[in-house]
Amino acid sequence: MSTGFIGLGAMGAPMAGHLASRGQLSVIDNRTRNKADALAAQLGVRAAATHADFAGCTVVALCVSMDADVLQQVEALAAVLKPGSVVVDHSTVSVETAKAAQARLAAQGIGFLDAPVSGGVEGARNGKLSVMVGGDAADLEIARPVLEAYAARITHMGGTGSGQATKAVNQVLVAGINEAVCEGLALGEKLGLDPDKLLPTLMAGAAGNWFLEKRGATLLRNQFTPGFKCGHLLKDLRIVHGMARTAGIRAPVIEQALADYSELVQRGEADADTSALILLKRQGGG
């Protein structure tokens, strides 16, 4: 299978690497040209000069930042891909964006899957991501060998947009867990507890979770290398907040996380890992 990959950030680069290791990757692209050139040389694949270089691909995967980026890429790919090919979007965007992308590609006979991922940079590096897929089942079967290169779990959630809807639920849980872990560990610091004893004790009980395991020790050392950036979670939370309002649910977790990550970004922490939230928790209330 000839596969293309667009978006070579902290998640996309290792995902592309897994495809290359299986001999499935043909061409890559990135907003920053020298990054695409360097990774292409490392992986032994082509760096795209234009979107026409993706014309021979059966599957093209996207892992970009913003809704506008997804729609821009879809518009360009719609002009060059063959009918029967599939675009897989691993970005986190709105349900409306996913539906607009699907409609644009369907007009050219090209399939589309909204397939956001969860598992963080560690999951991408280890090929252990959870992929939540919306779209046509037949398109998923075409793209499945690509997803299997970097996924521990692939779940077909339903029609177009259901992958992004699932990711919205995921991000509510992520944000809430971040809030609880950072608040709890800030309290532990104030109470003078030994982190070398505290963290394994918490992990062994009902409080154990991915964020505590992967970020607890580093955030207590003020090490905030992403990971998942504060600015990216803020973008996701804005999408989720709109969905929660439309759905008519009470959303204090989303609202608190939205306020906290807005403050972190305003303080210049947009590129820090989301565990930088502990910086706010340490400040105390008024």
Image (cartoon, rainbow, N blue to C red):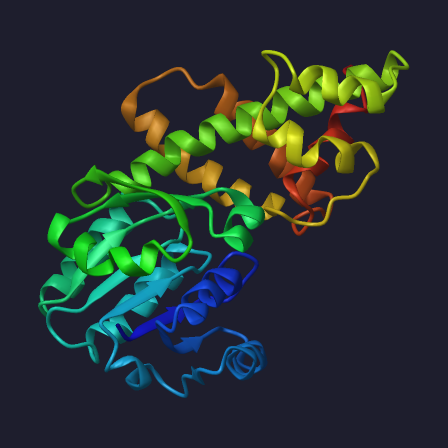
Asked if one can make out residue 241 in the rendered structure from this viewpoint, the answer is: no
Residue 110 location, quadrant: bottom left
Residue 191 position (above or below residue 104): above
Residue placed at 38% from the left, 73% from the top? 23
Q: Residue furthest front?
A: 22
Residue 248 location, quadrant: top left
Q: Residue furthest bottom?
A: 49
Quadrant in the picture for the C terminus: top right
Position of 23 with respect to 97 (left or right) is right
Asked if one can make out residue 143 in the rendered structure from this viewpoint, the answer is: yes
Residue placed at 90% from the left, 15% from the top? 192
x, y (%) of residue 94?
A: 33, 45
Q: Residue furthest right?
A: 192
x, y (%) of residue 66?
A: 43, 56
Position of 49 with respect to 272 (left or right) is left
Residue placed at 39% from the left, 58% from the top? 149
x, y (%) of residue 178?
A: 61, 28
Residue 152 location, quadrant: top left
Position of 109 with respect to 75 (left or right) is left
In front: 3, or 246? 3
Quadrant in the picture for the N terminus: bottom left
Residue 169 position (above or below residue 191): below
